[in-house]
Amino acid sequence: MQFEDRFVAFVDILGFSEKVEEREKRVGGLSQIENMVSALWSDERNNFPFTLCPQSDRVSEDLSFVATQISDCAVLSAEATPLGLLRLVDECGRSISNLLEIGLMARGYISKGLVYHKAGQFFGSAYQEAVKNEAKVRFSFHSSEVSKTPFVELSEAVTEFYRENTDQCVKRFLGESLIESGGLVAVDPFSRQKRLISMHASNLSSGDAAIKLKTVKHLSELRVCLEALRTQVDREAGTSERVQVKLSEYHTGLSRLLEQIETVFEMDELLSSPFSTLKIGDLGPI
């Protein structure tokens, strides 16, 4: 039994206490609460193999990944390698995405340092740093000094590790999974949707009419899903000023995604012109 240098994430469901009080009074409320905590973390996720960057260096085959969920909080940790960080960021992103689908926001912090984490036990300075700073998260899409925003933010040490990483495969996937603003870095709540938009944009340039028709259909469906996601989060969030400030961050992220979809449609219309010799890739990244 010993402390290890690891990446540690502490993730918390926002507004959970109020949700529990509401659902205690409803028929079937307990199952709804169980759905919330399962969205944050379920041990079944341990059975899903992590397949990104199989050739990248690792200390342990499973990247020494450990997760412990207690009520509305989850503590996740992994070995202190670039691939270990990618696994941790990917799992945080999955939790955020799962919670968004049921209208819930989350906040968290990722640190690096000494910790002991096995099954249901965890302690150490890296864990304490993550817990302490979760309530001070400052990452924002906007230029403001507002704190306690709904993001999983990286510590300065983790950010430095991320920027100095030279593993090209890990660098690529971390770049798709993280966002930067005002010198701060956080897990992108909408990275999965962004990847879908990028993939569909590439498919439009295939030249295959059947693929194009299917891709336009998928993009239109994704646009509807994003609008529904915004409605779901709005409905669950509440009306207090404190909550509305947090909600505005997600509104900004969702609006950017919807703008990207519109840009793809506009580009496709331009490229479909009988006089155009351009391809999607010629116009830069989406």
Image (cartoon, grey):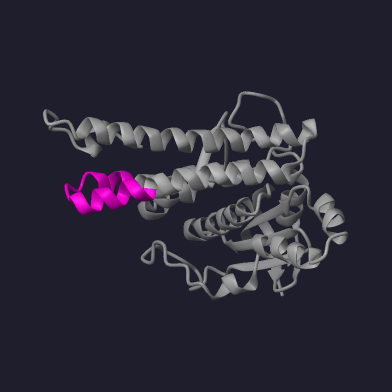
Check the image and report above or below for 129 versus 270: below
Query: What residue is shown at x 70% (from left), y 54% (from top)?
Result: 10
Query: How many labels sit on residues?
Result: 0
The percent coordinates of residue 89 (x first, y second) are: 55, 54
The percent coordinates of residue 74 (x first, y second) are: 71, 60
The percent coordinates of residue 134 (x first, y second) are: 73, 46
Q: Nearer the viewer, residue 160 or 227?
A: 227
**Left or right of 273: which side holds 123?**
right
**Left or right of 215: which side holds 186?**
right
Q: Nearer the viewer, residue 196 or 226?
A: 226
The quarter holding residue 235 reads top right
Outermost top residue = 143
Any part of residue 177 in sight = no
Which image quarter is the N terminus in?
bottom right
Q: Which segment is the magenta one?
A: 200-218
The percent coordinates of residue 275 (x first, y second) are: 11, 28
Check the image and report above or below for 106 versus 1: above
Which image quarter is the C terminus in?
top left
Q: Is residue 215 magenta?
A: yes
Query: What residue is shown at x 48% (from left), y 45% (from top)?
Result: 224
Q: Main secondary structure of the magenta part?
A: helix
Q: Is residue 237 magenta?
A: no
Any part of residue 46 in sight = yes
Query: What residue is shown at x 57% (from left), y 28% (from top)?
Result: 182
**Left or right of 263: which side holds 86?**
right
